[in-house]
């Protein structure tokens, strides 16, 4: 079973968050300007000092709240980030972008219901806000609603044909629906729009692996990694390609890096376990199968690979039981070949 998460929610809000169009005219202050420079230089704690001063001086300073939300986000203080985003809605509630910005934070927090509610509100305020449809397509994918993702991404593309992220979201939806050829088309368009987009290369590579163009897929997942060396999903995708072409040691390395960079899907442990069995380390494979089953006790792939490891260790009765468990879960062993 060679699964791969194609992406993760955006860890940081875009710089557009700080400068969304306002119904209240933002007031530029020296403190705002200094804070912005510090944020650009990634000096987030120092930026907070100036932003706190700006807000104390003017409790309706939209720019200061926006930039402080960004600083809190970068610092990982998401409760305070959410409080500032909510304050922006209180001050500027007719601005659709305010709701979209908070929806981005809800997506990162994996609170999909609240993300949907804010995006629906944003679209009701501004039905032509293409970025809201793009973000909702992202939420659709994470909520396992690929058909809805295709509709939302297509609407975003209709409104803004140069929205590369919308093409990426639609490509991911096609991958979830096992439509790799469509995913290739959308990924290529996204790359044409932005040749530095790692998500586009990863969706392209994942689709190519599904189409058995393994070397091309490995190459494009590698491009995604070159552009973002901490991109866990790209390591997972390339590992799947390496397994398909028999490069088990390379697959082990990529699975390990994916885990290092935050991958938590059972499949990454299953894939590394399979590679470990193939290179003669069944005892280590059993540990990875245990990790996979802790994440998903109904992973047929984990039970099947565990049976392979147990067979290698001569524990044939246990192996037979694990194989039977995989069959009960309707796992198709041909996925491992």
Image: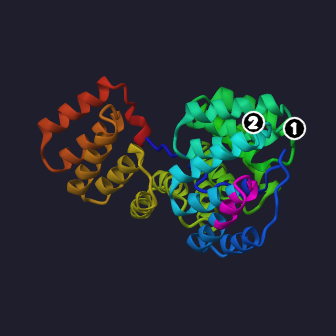
**Which residue occupies the foreground of this view, 115 or 282?**
115
- Assess disc 2: are there few (<14), some (14-19) or many (≥20) residues with their C-alpha within 10 Å of its C-alpha: many
Secondary structure under badge 2? helix
Q: What is the x, y in percent for residue 298?
A: 32, 31
Instruction: Classify residue 161 as left or right of residue 185.
Output: right
Secondary structure under badge 1? helix
Asked if the stretch drawn in magenta spans residue 54, the answer is yes
Residue 72 appears anywhere in the view: yes
Q: Quadrant of residue 296?
A: top left
Residue 6 appears anywhere in the view: no
Q: What is the x, y in percent for residue 146?
A: 63, 30
According to the picture, the residue beneath numbered tag 1 turns out to be 159
Identify the residue at image location x=87%, y=43%: 161
Identify the residue at image location x=38%, y=44%: 266
Identify the residue at image location x=30%, y=23%: 328
Identify the residue at image location x=64%, y=30%: 117
Q: What is the x, y in percent for residue 135?
A: 69, 41
Q: Which mark is residue 133?
A: 2
Q: Are marks 1 and 2 in contact (CB under 8 Å)?
A: yes
Q: Is residue 72 above or below residue 186?
A: below
Instruction: Classify residue 291 as left or right of residue 226.
Output: left
Image quadrant in which the C terminus is located = top left
Q: Which residues are magenta?
A: 53-64
Asked if the stretch drawn in magenta spans residue 45, the answer is no
């Amino acid at each position: 079973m060679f699964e791969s998460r194609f992406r993760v929610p955006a860890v940081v809000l875009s710089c557009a968050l700080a400068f969304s169009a306002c119904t209240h005219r933002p007031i530029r202050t020296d403190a705002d300007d200094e804070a912005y420079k510090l944020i650009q230089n990634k000096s987030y704690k120092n930026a907070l000092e100036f932003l706190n001063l700006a807000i104390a001086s003017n409790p309706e300073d939209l720019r200061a709240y926006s930039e402080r939300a960004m600083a809190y986000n970068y610092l990982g203080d998401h409760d305070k980030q959410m409080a500032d985003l909510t304050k922006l809605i209180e001050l500027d509630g007719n601005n659709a972008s305010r709701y979209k910005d908070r929806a981005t934070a809800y997506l990162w927090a994996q609170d999909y219901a609240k993300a949907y509610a804010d995006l629906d509100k944003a679209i009701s305020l501004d039905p032509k806000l293409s970025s809201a449809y793009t973000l909702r397509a992202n939420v659709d994918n994470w909520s396992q609603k690929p058909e809805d993702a295709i509709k939302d991404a297509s609407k975003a593309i209709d409104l803004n044909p140069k929205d590369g992220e919308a093409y990426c979201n639609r490509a991911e939806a096609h991958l979830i629906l096992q439509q790799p050829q469509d995913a290739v088309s959308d990924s290529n368009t996204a790359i044409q729009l932005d040749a530095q987009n790692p998500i586009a290369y990863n969706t392209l590579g994942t689709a190519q692996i599904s189409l058995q163009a393994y070397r091309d897929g490995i190459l494009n997942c590698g491009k995604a990694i070159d552009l973002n060396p901490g991109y866990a999903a790209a390591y997972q995708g390339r590992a799947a390609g390496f397994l398909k072409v028999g490069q088990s040691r390379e697959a082990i390395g990529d699975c390990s890096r994916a885990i290092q960079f935050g991958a938590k899907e059972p499949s990454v442990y299953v894939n590394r376990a399979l590679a470990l069995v193939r290179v003669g380390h069944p005892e280590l494979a059993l540990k990875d199968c245990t990790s996979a089953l802790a994440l998903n006790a109904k992973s047929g792939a984990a039970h099947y690979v565990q049976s392979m490891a147990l067979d290698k260790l001569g524990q044939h009765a246990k192996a037979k039981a694990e194989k039977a468990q995989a069959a009960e879960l309707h796992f198709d062993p041909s996925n491992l070949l």
